Amino acid sequence: MSPLADALPRQEIEHLQLTAKFFRGLGDPTRLKILELLLEREHRVTEMVNLLKVPQGRLSNHLACLSWCGYVTTTRQGRNRYYRVADKRVRKILELARDMVANNAEHIWACTRLPKS
């Protein structure tokens, strides 16, 4: 149980946990790169496998995570499934993250409290 459990109402703790989980969806370099590719245009899995040089199974797991968190969606055209960014706010989230990282890169690299990817 979180140390916050005694300090905050259950509903607020659940909201904080859900928000943290939402951000963990962005917590992998491969998932971030997938989103960058999909911000350019929609792609099929085979295209992304070729571009990213990752196994299809691993890519599919990342796409499932991004889909469950609401970052990407798919459309089917015949036998092909095309992935695209589900919400235009994803671009803003990533732009804000890039700006903050640029301003704080030295401190982020030096942080010993978070694992390095």
Image (cartoon, rainbow, N blue to C red):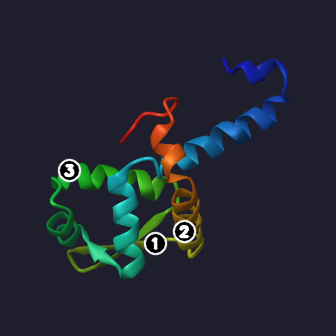
Task: Say which residue appears at 15% left-offset and 60% top-offset.
Answer: 53
Q: Answer few, some or many: residues within 10 Å of disc 1's Cα (few below 14, many 20 plus, some between 14 and 19).
A: many
User: CA separation, marks 3 and 1?
Assistant: 20 Å
Question: Left or right: where does residue 67 sit relative to residue 78?
Answer: right
Among the 4 quarters of the image, the one containing residue 21: top right
Instruction: Give residue 25's mark.
Output: none
User: CA separation, marks 2 and 1?
Assistant: 7 Å
Instruction: Give residue 85's mark.
Output: 1
Identified by mark 3, the residue type is Gly
Q: Earlier in the sequence, mark 2 or mark 1?
A: 1
Q: Answer few, some or many: residues within 10 Å of disc 3's Cα (few below 14, many 20 plus, some between 14 and 19).
A: few
Label 1: which secondary element = strand
Task: Say which residue appears at 75% left-offset and 33% top-offset.
Answer: 13
Q: Which residue is mark 2?
A: 90
Identified by mark 1, the residue type is Val
Q: Which residue is mark 3?
A: 57
- Are the residues tagged 2 and 1 within 8 Å (C-beta)? yes
